[in-house]
Each structure stands twice: as structure tokens, then as C-alpha cells.
Image (tube, rainbow, N blue to C red):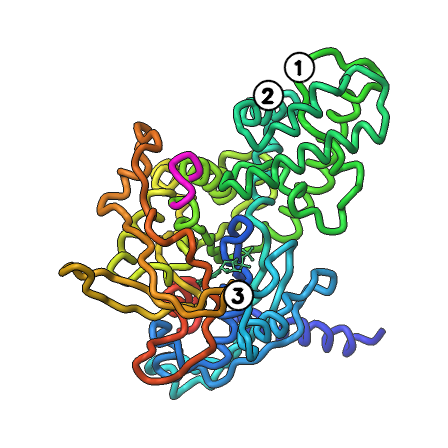
Amino acid sequence: GTIADTVGRGIEGVTQGVSGLFFEPVIRLGVTGLSRAGKTVFITSLVANLLDRGRMPGLEAARSGRIEAAFLQPQPDDTVPRFDFESHLAALTGPTPRWPESTRAVSELRLSLRVRPKGLLSGLQGPRTVHLDIVDYPGEWLLDLALLEQSYADWSRDALARAKTRPEAAGWRAALSAADPTAKLDEPAATALARAWTGYLAAARAAGYSDCTPGRFLLPGDLDGSPALTFAPLPPGDTPRGSLAREFARRYEAYKAQVVKPFFRAHFARIDRQVVLVDALGAIHAGPRALEDLRQALAGILGAFRPGRNAFLSALLGQKRVDRILFAATKADHLHHHQHDRLAQVMGALVADARRRADFAGAETQAMAIAALRATVEETRTVQGREVDLVRGTLLDTGKPAALHPGDLPADPAVLLSPARDGADRWLDGEFGVMRFAPAPLSLRPGDGPPHIRLDRAAEFLLGDKLR
Ligand code: GDP
């Protein structure tokens, strides 16, 4: 209660503020991508390699030895699940390495780096600590942003139009034709429709389609079975009071207000740097329709980084912006490095439209081909007088080694993305389909190359300037 107390508290507040600002900067790195894009493997490998520090020559602070220490710390957010780094690393590096469990919901991990400043300053200033808060979240959740601008009727119309022709939606169509939207709400009937819609979304995802909303239906977390996740699109028609149709429209609004918006508020709005991971190879292999669909889904995801378009998001973010965005095509270890440039170009082409339109409100962007965990080594063989580039790894199913040729990417990515492409031409039609490699046991033998592909360059783009 004395004046001295007040002054004392004031000074303490100031010094905390100053150290927060100048000596312990925090970078919130968002990691997203559609399911199976490679988020879990990316984060696990990034953290393992930063902790190790020896295998990241493309990260200037690591190469020059300025990272004096790297350590995991308790994260700042007490109610967000922690990214289970240790279990994931154990899966990847155990005696029989296996891929870790994939991302199902949002999670977070804090990695702190003690960094010596660069150049002249290093003599004057001691090392400082930079906190890297990694936030892992499903890209599907970003797709829901578009729902905020759509009424239930609009969303239903678009979603039903897509489901109309797809074979994956046969079960859904049967369920819909058996339902009566004007009938009085009956919870089992509502659940049956929601399940049929979820089943269709899952099948569509498995077939390579990306535009699967509502995003939480596929990754519901602890909302599974709640009313906010128990609805489905319905064709236009009467919506009498108390009817299924009326209730579904209400639940759709509840989903937006109580599921979608809180995620953007609590997580998305606080991100400084973002990496968007994309399984471009998988989509190319699945065929032109899947690739076009991925392009559209990416445009949807990227809409979140152009907040000017969305009233809710502009109001939420104010002046705060993500200032660097990396688009990374993952699993590049399926290709010989001769084709990596082509993959990076496909990645660039996939986001080119979105980039041109608004250039992400001034954010710096880059497209890259990476492999967070290299499961293969390269090999060139002469087959019938012709040199063939192969990659060799251990097959997951049989445990046997195999050297395979995935097929080729075109020299011009436009070939893949041109609207005229009708599915007659195939790319990556070699042995890509059987390339399910097990993670390679970590090897540090000279000549084997680093255990990742360009993960260090990705880190340099995302964090390098903050470690100077
Ligand atoms: P998430 O759903 O985005 O978290 O995806 P995961 O990180 O779980 O990755 C999905 C699957 O992609 C893994 O189980 C692996 O089979 C594969 N994968 C991910 N990253 C790599 C990589 O760098 N190289 C290879 N060969 N496969 C990868």
C-alpha cells in the first residue's frame, strides 16, 4: 500500500516489459496443411534438428554456431494440448521406425534458443533467448473461414452440387433421399444424416478431394457427437418451425459462432509466421481432378492470410499480420533431386493465383520442395541403355528394401494445372503408387546426406531474421 510499493511494482513492470520486448522475443510459428500433408513429421523433425543443431547448415544461425543452446520449455498456453514431441520422435527413431500419429487438433510446443547476436554486436551483447512457439493445427479448420461469409442455404447449395456427381457420395445421396427435412426434428434421423455427410467427406478426402467442409466433421476432437457437429446440407425448401431443416440451419450458425470463430480468435490471430504444408505429390498422382480440387482448397486456406476479404477476420486481426508464409510441398524424398525444382514450381503454380490477387497483404512468401524426414537415398541405374533416376528405401508393408522410379513431373507446371486437362495425361504414373516407405533409421554416416531435404532452408526463411 505504500508509495514505495507502487513505485517498485511499476519498475518491475517496466523491466519485464523491456526484457519481453528486447531480450526474449517470442515467435509464434503456425504449422498447417490438410490432413496427411506432413505436419506432425515436420514439427518433430524441425524440433529434433534444432535441438541437435548439427544438421541444419542452411540455417545461418546454426551454421555459424551462434545457437549456443536449444531446449524445450513449458508452453505459455495452459489449456492447449502440448505437441507430443517425445512420443512422435520415439516412433520415428525407435528400433523399427514408424510414422507417428497424425495431427487431429490444435497443439503447441515451446522451443527456446539461446542465440549469440551476429557480427559486431556479439562482442557487446551477451546471448539472448528467443522463444519459438510452434502451433500445429489442421488446415481443414481454415477452410471453415469461408463458411463465415455463407448462409446455410448458400453453403448447402455449393456442398450439395459437389456431392451430386461424386461416387463417394452415393451413401449420402441415399440417406438424403430417405430424409424429410420438413418433418419434426428427430435426433436419430439428424444423427444419421450427419453421419452420412461425414462418411462422404472422409471418402472424398481418401479419394484425394480437399474441399471438405465443415472441417471439424473430419477432425472433431472433443466436439464429436455435439449438436454443433450434428447437421448436414439440405436442398432449398420449406423450413417449418421445429423441423429438421430449421434446426440444421440453426446448428450451422452455432457451428460458426461457437466452433469456427473461437479457433480464429484463440489461435490463428496470434500467429507471426506460417508454414503451409502440401502433399502436392499425392494430389498429382491422384489425378487432375484431385489436383484442381487441391488448388481450390489452397485458395480457400490462403484466404485466411488475406484478411481484407473477410469482415470477421479484419476486425479480429486489426493491424496484426503474418509477415512470412512458406508454401512447402512435402515428401520430396519420393523424387530424385533432379525433379525437386519441378516440384517447387508446381507448388508455386498451385498458389500463384492467390499470390497474384493480393500478395497476402504484404507478407513475404516462398514456395519450396522439402522432406522433413528423408526416407530414401538416391540411385541412378542404366536400364536398356537409358539412365533412370531411382530412390531407394524400405517398404513399410514388407520391410524389404526397394529402388523405385516414381514417374516424372512435367517441365512446365502449367501442364498440370491447365483447365483443358481432362485426365487423359498422367503424371507420376510410375511406381509412385507403391512408394510407401518406412521412415529411415537415423544415419549420420558420411555420404548418406542429411536426414531431411531443405528443412534448414525452410527454417531460415521462417525464422532466420529473428535469430540475427
Ligand atoms: P499430418 O496429418 O499433416 O500431421 O501428417 P503427418 O505428419 O502425420 O504425415 C502423414 C504421412 O505422410 C506420414 O505418416 C508419412 O507416411 C508421410 N510423410 C510425412 N512427411 C514425410 C517425409 O518427409 N518423407 C516421407 N517419405 N514421407 C513423409
In the image, farthest residue toward the left: 385
State the residue lying farthest toward the front: 384
The residue under the point 61% across, 62% down is 101
Residue at x 79% of width, y 29% of height: 190
Q: From which residue to which does the magenta span run? A: 285-290
Q: Tell me whether circle 2 and circle 3 mark residues in contact (CB < 8 Å).
A: no
Proximity of marks 2 and 1: CB atoms separated by less than 8 Å = yes
Asked if one can make out residue 325 in the rendered structure from this viewpoint, the answer is: yes
Which label sits on residue 300?
Answer: none
Q: Amino acid at mark 2?
A: Arg
Q: Is mark 3 within 8 Å of ligand 1?
A: yes
Where residue 372 sits in the image (x, y, percent)? Answer: 44, 65
Residue that carries the numbered disc 1 in the rendered image: 236
Given the image, on which type of amino acid does mark 1 rest? Pro
Give the secondary structure at mark 2.
Answer: helix
Along the line of sight, which residue is nearer the eye, 127 or 179? Answer: 179
| Picture layout, residue 50 above or below residue 43 | below
Residue at which label 2 appears = 157
Q: Main secondary structure of the magenta part?
A: helix
User: Is 150 in front, or is 464?
Assistant: 150
Vertical arrangement, residue 249 with respect to residue 362, above or below: above
